[in-house]
């Protein structure tokens, strides 16, 4: 099956609507299903000049986040992708992430999207792999820094005090987090080894592992992935320091801006101390693991559930913490679905897939 056919099926209307409806339904249930006093509780936000500044700062950080992603992919493509191409790719990448379960994300779609951009064969997958490596490296570095800096405050909340019924206790959350962290750490180390040190040995390891009876069904995918690692290694191994500095800096700016959005939203309602901002930032590193394993599209429902548990101590009431979680998602999640729907037709037309999509939809009716 061709990449163009795969991407067209990925963005079929039914595939978009089903997870969107599910995600919105779960979100609305968690927020409105347990509270009939929406208007009263939301009036707790006093829209002073200071609050408006913090709200605009949160939106500005999302713009910085997206600009960082766009800049990074242009750097990784060695400027072979135009700014217009980079914008459309990132918006569709985020769109794909928003309609996919957290554990899957938009990486698979990103490979298919990039494949339509007429770059040299293998380069598109190489860019996606390097992007994934840079993202994981940021997380691997920032997490121990956060835990080292925050010595007297736990980053794991007590779900018994959350606004929603407890679905996981603190100890289980701690075990889940560290299991996820060390799994990602092992994967990041292996990816770095494969990309920059001994790609041939890494390929042999992958080929050997998938010979196990339980993994044989993944043999073809594993072989293709190992080939992609070799291509990515040849493409990027000899890049100069300036290349890695710029792409790493773009990654750091992007992820830092992403996490600071919640800090700005909390300042709408409560003036926390400077040291507490670092704790809030650190808690988001823990939240990210939970959203990574979420089974709902874009973590919908799960994100709204865990937000009050993590951020409730910094907000006036439990009720407003639930509602602030929706404001957070309205800024950081739902816009990408709207923008993605708007960008998709223009991208399809630019890469020549518009008529193919129409024929595909007609055949499915």
Image: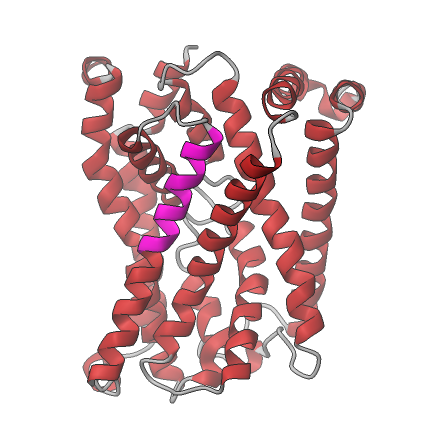
As for residue 64 lying within the magenta part, the answer is yes
State the count of labels: 0
For residue 322, above or below residue 236: below
The answer to whether one can see residue 28 in this image is no
| Quadrant position of the C terminus in the picture | top left
Q: Nearer the viewer, residue 203 or 74?
A: 74
* Residue 29 quadrant: bottom left
Residue 139 position, x and y percent, is 60, 53
> Would residue 239 be found to the left or right of residue 206 on screen?
left
> Would residue 96 be found to the left or right of residue 161 on screen?
left
Residue 261 position, x and y percent, is 39, 66
For residue 12, above or below residue 268: above
Residue 307 position, x and y percent, is 45, 70
* Residue 350 quadrant: top left
> Would residue 287 be found to the left or right of residue 55 on screen?
right
Residue 86 position, x and y percent, is 34, 33
The residue sitting at 81% across, 19% down in the picture is: 208
């Amino acid at each position: 099956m061709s990449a163009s056919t795969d991407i067209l099926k990925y963005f079929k209307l039914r595939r978009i609507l089903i997870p969107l409806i599910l995600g919105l339904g779960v979100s609305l249930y968690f927020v409105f299903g347990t509270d009939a006093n929406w208007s009263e509780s939301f009036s707790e936000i006093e829209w002073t000049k200071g609050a408006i500044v913090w709200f605009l700062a949160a939106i500005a950080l999302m713009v910085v986040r997206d600009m960082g992603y766009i800049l990074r992919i242009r750097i990784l493509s060695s400027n072979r992708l135009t700014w217009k191409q980079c914008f459309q790719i990132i918006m569709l990448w985020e769109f794909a992430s928003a309609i996919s379960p957290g554990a899957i994300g938009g990486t698979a779609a990103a490979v298919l999207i990039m494949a339509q951009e007429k770059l040299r064969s293998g380069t598109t997958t190489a860019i996606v792999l390097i992007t994934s490596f840079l993202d994981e490296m940021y997380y691997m570095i920032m997490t121990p820094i956060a835990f080292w800096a925050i010595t007297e405050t736990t980053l794991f909340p007590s779900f018994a005090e959350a606004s929603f019924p407890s679905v996981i206790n603190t100890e289980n959350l701690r075990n889940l987090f560290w299991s996820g962290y060390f799994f990602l750490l092992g994967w990041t180390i292996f990816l770095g080894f494969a990309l920059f040190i001994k790609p041939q040995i890494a390929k042999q390891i992958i080929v050997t592992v998938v010979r196990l009876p339980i993994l044989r069904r993944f043999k073809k995918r594993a072989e293709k992935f190992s080939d992609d690692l070799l291509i990515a290694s040849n493409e990027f191994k000899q890049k100069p320091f300036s290349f890695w500095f710029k792409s790493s800096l773009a990654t750091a700016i992007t992820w830092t801006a992403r996490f600071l959005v919640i800090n700005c939203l909390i300042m709408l309602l409560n003036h926390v101390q400077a040291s507490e901002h670092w704790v809030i930032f650190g808690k988001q590193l823990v939240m990210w693991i939970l959203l990574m394993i979420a089974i709902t599209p874009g973590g919908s429902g799960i994100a709204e559930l865990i937000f009050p548990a993590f951020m409730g101590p910094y907000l006036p009431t439990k009720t407003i913490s639930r509602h602030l979680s929706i404001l957070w998602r309205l800024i950081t999640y739902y816009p990408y679905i709207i923008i993605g729907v708007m960008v998709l037709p223009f991208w399809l037309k630019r890469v020549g897939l518009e008529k193919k999509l129409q024929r595909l939809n007609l055949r499915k009716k």
